[in-house]
């Protein structure tokens, strides 16, 4: 079950990775015309509408992305089926269709059906489409129906499945919707405290990948909050909309890089050079783009208590930003790029105070992490026993760094005899192996990767960083030889 949820989290990253395009377009558009929102500039209007075309269709992106990511072959027919699934459901359960089925006026239809085209249904559509692909993509029909065999059968079976799913949703969706709204409203009604609780659990769920489910309630239009969509579209309340995003900026731009500095300063002298290269790259990624996994995975499992402290500080940051109505937003993550792009949006409220808050949190992170690491002798990077970090290898350098790193990681995994499948998300290699005991973690760590996460007896993750796609590509080349 956990492996399935991990795959779902990875699949969600594909459509989420499209959001920076919307952020750039809308950010530049609002920067050009911060008051008229495009009314006073054709160029601004063009850019804003172009970005909105992505933001407004997030559910469709989820349907296509999840279907593609969860399909065993990641084939295009699975993506088409995801779109088919979403269109069937949203058409059958649109307010007009429901009104006709119930024999009532459209105004009398449950409001839940007015929100049927949401991220939740998009994800459900993608999951069902992927299941249909995995089940029917290799089915051979009788000769008379041979044209519809295999991959051509998948969209047909998906459409049929979604008719059944739509019947179930007809009765279940109003209950689910009201429950989600109550949950979101319950947290949002807590104001700054609610934002803090969200931030705390957001970080705690990172190791499992389940933070995407929590994010969908607050960031997208599942429970009517839609914090990202409303913030970038300029529809909401200034100083309130964006409260589930703003507090991440001080953490990702300042707090985590400062934590990386603390880990560098507390590393053993002979390992400082290796730790410096790791923390510099990870800290820069966190500051510039908001990609935090290389830093977080560096201490998440070796010092879990430290990670809980990090989660608590994140919650505190969101609570403080919300308390003072400081808001900024992001299309991808809370890094410098999104901060600059969102700072002049109509609903951005005193965003530069988040930088002041960030400087304070940077100091807190540095001294608190340094104190806890030394006080409790936590084994953060560079503080392991001599053989644990470096093994018999060395940090990979030189022109062919990626290919050499990939070869050494693959060898450490056990090579062709042990590796079953290879995949990746934004920062992690996600691998299935036959025998976990055959994995040489020392050899893998010797490449300088931030960390390793043993998910189950057959599944392992290697945290590489933002260059993970290139490492994965090189491993795939090795497997094909």
Image (cartoon, rainbow, N blue to C red):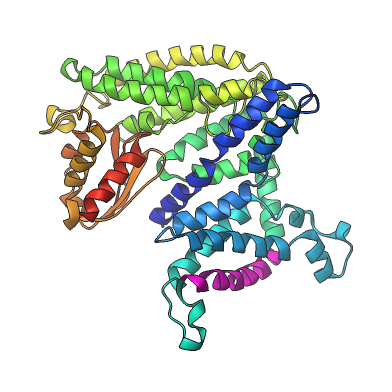
- Looking at this view, is 436 or 49 the one in front? 49
State whether residue 345 is above or below residue 411.
above
358 horizontally vs 52: left or right: left
State whether residue 397 is above or below residue 110.
above
Q: Position of residue 365 (x, y in %)?
A: 42, 18
365 horizontally vs 405: left or right: right
State whether residue 138 is above or below residue 4.
below
- Assess whether residue 306 is covered by the magenta stretch: no
Q: Position of residue 475 (x, y in %)?
A: 26, 47
- Looking at this view, is 325 or 130 the one in front? 130
- Looking at this view, is 459 or 199 the one in front? 459
Quadrant for residue 392, please give it.
top left
For the record, the magenta segment spans 151-172
Q: Position of residue 267 (x, y in %)?
A: 24, 19
User: Residue at the spot x=41%, y=58% of the render?
Assistant: 1
User: Residue at the spot x=42%, y=45% of the render?
Assistant: 208
User: Residue at the spot x=65%, y=45% of the render?
Assistant: 183
Dominant SS of magenta comes to helix
| Quadrant showing the C terminus | bottom left
Q: Position of residue 51 (x, y in %)?
A: 65, 36
User: Residue at the spot x=66%, y=49% of the render?
Assistant: 180
Quadrant for residue 463, please give it.
top left
Query: What number of labels is visible?
Result: 0
Kindly give the residue lying farthest to the front in the view shown.
42
């Amino acid at each position: 079950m956990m492996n399935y949820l991990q795959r779902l989290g990875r699949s969600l990253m594909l459509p989420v990775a499209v959001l920076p395009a919307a952020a750039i377009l809308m950010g530049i558009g609002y920067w050009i015309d911060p008051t008229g929102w495009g009314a006073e500039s054709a160029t601004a209007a063009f850019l804003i509408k172009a970005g909105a075309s992505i933001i407004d269709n997030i559910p469709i992106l989820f349907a296509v992305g999840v279907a593609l990511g969860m399909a065993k072959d990641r084939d295009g027919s699975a993506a088409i089926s995801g779109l088919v699934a979403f269109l069937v459901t949203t058409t059958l359960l649109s307010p007009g269709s429901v009104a006709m089925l119930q024999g009532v006026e459209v105004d009398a239809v449950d409001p839940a059906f007015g929100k049927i085209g949401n991220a939740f249904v998009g994800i459900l559509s993608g999951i069902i489409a992927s299941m249909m692909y995995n089940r029917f993509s290799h089915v051979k029909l009788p000769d008379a129906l041979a044209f519809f065999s295999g991959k051509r059968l998948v969209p047909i079976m998906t459409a049929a499945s979604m008719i059944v799913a739509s019947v179930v949703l007809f009765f279940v969706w109003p209950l689910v919707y009201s429950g989600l709204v109550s949950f979101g409203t319950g947290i949002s009604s807590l104001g700054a405290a609610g934002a803090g609780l969200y931030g705390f659990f957001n970080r705690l769920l990172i190791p499992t990948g389940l933070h995407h489910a929590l994010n969908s309630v607050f960031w997208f239009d599942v429970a009517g909050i839609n914090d990202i969509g409303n913030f970038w579209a300029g529809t909401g309340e200034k100083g309130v909309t964006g409260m589930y995003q703003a507090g991440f900026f001080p953490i990702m731009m300042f707090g985590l890089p400062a934590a990386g500095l603390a880990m560098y300063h507390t590393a053993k002298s002979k390992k400082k050079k290796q730790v410096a290269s790791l923390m510099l790259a990870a800290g820069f990624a966190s500051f510039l783009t908001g990609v935090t996994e290389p830093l977080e995975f560096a201490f998440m499992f070796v010092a879990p208590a430290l990670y809980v402290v990090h989660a608590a500080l994140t919650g505190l940051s969101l609570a403080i930003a919300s308390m003072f109505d400081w808001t900024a937003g992001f299309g991808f993550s809370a890094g410098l790029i999104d901060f600059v792009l969102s700072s002049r949006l109509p609903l951005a409220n005193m965003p530069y105070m988040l930088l002041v808050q960030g400087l304070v949190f940077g100091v807190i992170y540095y001294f608190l992490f340094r104190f806890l690491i030394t006080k409790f002798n936590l084994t953060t990077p560079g503080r392991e026993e001599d053989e644990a970090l470096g093994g018999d290898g060395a940090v990979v350098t030189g022109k062919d760094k990626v290919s050499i790193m990939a070869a050494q990681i693959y060898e450490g995994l056990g090579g062709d005899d042990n590796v079953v499948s290879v995949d990746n998300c934004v920062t992690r290699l996600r691998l299935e192996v036959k025998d976990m005991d055959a994995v040489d973690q020392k050899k893998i760590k010797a490449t300088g990767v931030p960390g390793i996460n043993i998910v189950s007896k057959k599944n392992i993750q290697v945290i590489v960083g933002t260059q993970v796609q290139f490492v994965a590509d090189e491993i795939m080349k090795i497997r094909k030889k």
